[in-house]
Amino acid sequence: MIAAGLIELTIDGKKIAVPKDTTVFDAARLNGIAIPTLCHQQNETPVGVCRLCVVDVNARVFTASCVRPSSQTWSSLPRPRKSSARAAP
């Protein structure tokens, strides 16, 4: 059972519980899962424009984990899947 005010989600196959409205980046960091980022340096405000912290949430596009609120409706993979597409010779 999850405590009041917490949501449960899965990141990289690990089930975790975090307070509602916690960003995906913070949820991962609080649970020992590393996601690279630039905007979480001292005196910086996350805005999601550098795209270094993108994660795959099984949506149409990857999302910036620094600004995306956690949701218990999906699983997140910290590293985007590699594309199998190749350039034509």
Image (cartoon, rainbow, N blue to C red):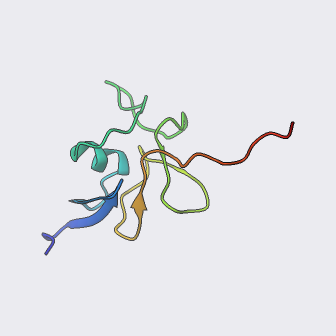
Does residue 70 lie above or below 39 as drawn?
A: below
Residue sitting at x 52%, y 62%? 58
> Which residue appears farthest toward the right when viewing the image?
89
User: Whole-percent x and y of residue 26?
Assistant: 30, 45
User: Whole-percent x and y of residue 62?
Assistant: 55, 51
Say which quarter of the image contains residue 59: bottom right
| Quarter placement of the C terminus | top right
Of 37 and 11, the residue lying toward us: 11
User: Whole-percent x and y of residue 24?
Assistant: 36, 51
Residue sitting at x 35%, y 26%? 41
Residue sitting at x 34%, y 68%? 72
Q: Is residue 11 left or right of residue 62?
A: left
Residue sitting at x 75%, y 42%? 86
> Which residue appears farthest toward the front when viewing the image?
89
Q: Is residue 32 left or right of residue 57?
A: left
User: Whole-percent x and y of residue 22?
Assistant: 30, 54
Does residue 45 lie above or below 75 as drawn?
A: above
Say which quarter of the image contains residue 88: top right
Of 74 and 45, the residue lying toward us: 74
Does residue 37 lie above or below 18 as drawn?
A: above
Say which quarter of the image contains residue 87: top right
Does residue 29 lie above or below 71 as drawn?
A: above
Q: Is residue 85 left or right of residue 43?
A: right
